[in-house]
Image (cartoon, rainbow, N blue to C red):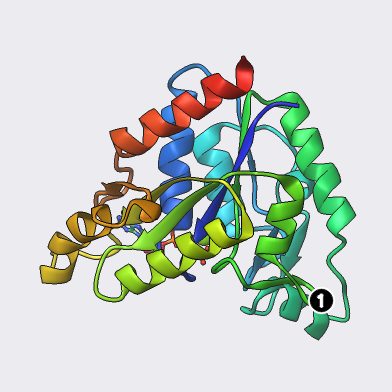
Amino acid sequence: MNPALFVAGTDTGVGKTHVAMALCRALRSRGLRVGVMKPAETGCHSDAPPDALALIEASGCRAPLDLVCPYRFADPLAPGVAAECEGRTVDILRLDAALAELRSSHDVVVCEGAGGLLVPLAGTIVYADWLESTGLPVLLVGRLGLGTLNHVLLSARYLAARGIPHLATVLSATQTPADLAETTNPGVLARYPESRIAGVLAHGLSPEFPQPALDVIIEWLKGQCR
Ligand SMILES: Nc1ncnc2c1ncn2[C@@H]1O[C@H](COP(=O)(O)OP(=O)(O)OP(=O)(O)O)[C@@H](O)[C@H]1O
Ligand SMILES: [Mg+2]
């Protein structure tokens, strides 16, 4: 099975899609067939889930929307909760099957979560539970700015406690101009090796994926192909 990685956030709106798109562009420009997945998207029209469509655009993935984003919900809630409100259920086996199919037809699959690691996905099953069962490693995304140190360290230590592989962390510059917290965030996180801080995604429409994080991911990919 070809490799896949999971883009987890420290929260909602921290830049997961922006970072995942930059990663897709970087991998695609290296000639890789990049597949994408957003297992569940909420607060969207079922024909037009914005994150899934943005990932498709950035990656050039041609898989059908039902495979890329099997579950779309109108309510802007955690997927497990949105499903409950609509009287539907998220079937983990369907997610596993979609992921497997995407992995079989692409060199690498980039899969974006929703919110943070403990967001309900299906009933009481949270994203981290699904993640653990898939064995996918994590690219953690945090927001550059005040509050991120706590969020990144909590998420990184939680991944370590669960034994979920953590490849790297990227902070996304969701806003400009930079404030004092933003300029100090990367250096402070670097003092905590478990943060695996590996760069900042600059503010912009289509910024370059940070090179140190890309180096880690390319190394990991090479290891998967050996
Ligand atoms: N590096 C960046 N440069 C400019 N804008 C950014 C950057 N990162 C994030 N943003 C903006 O911040 C907002 C949130 O980003 P994004 O949608 O990527 O977050 P997310 O974590 O994927 O959110 P969700 O939890 O809804 O999936 C968006 O409006 C996005 O355009
Ligand atoms: Mg997103």
Specify the quadrant that holds the C terminus.
top right
Residue 67, by quadrant, is top right
Q: Secondary structure at mark 1?
A: loop
31 shown above or below 158 = above
Going by the image, does 138 lie left or right of 188? right
- Whole-percent x and y of residue 174? 30, 62
Residue 159, by quadrant, is bottom right
Q: Furthest-left residue in view?
A: 180
Q: Which residue does the numbered mark 1 point to in the structure image?
A: 123
Specify the quadrant that holds the N terminus.
top right
- Whole-percent x and y of residue 115? 55, 69
Image point (59%, 44%), residue name? 137
Q: Does the beta carbon at disc 1 come under 8 Å from ligand 1?
A: no
Going by the image, does 60 lie left or right of 205? right
Q: Furthest-bottom residue in view?
A: 85
Q: Crowdedness of circle 1 by 10 Å Cα count: few (<14), some, many (20+)?
A: some
Image point (68%, 54%), residue name? 131
Q: Nearer the viewer, residue 143 or 28?
A: 143
Going by the image, does 78 lie left or right of 23? right
Going by the image, does 67 lie left or right of 36? right
Q: Nearer the viewer, residue 134 or 34?
A: 134
Image point (33%, 43%), residue name? 206
Q: Amino acid at mark 1?
A: Gly
Image point (46%, 32%), residue name? 217
94 shown above or below 4 = below
Quadrant containing ligand 1: bottom left
47 shown above or below 21 = below
- Whole-percent x and y of residue 209? 34, 39
Count of residue discs? 1
- Whole-percent x and y of residue 91? 87, 61
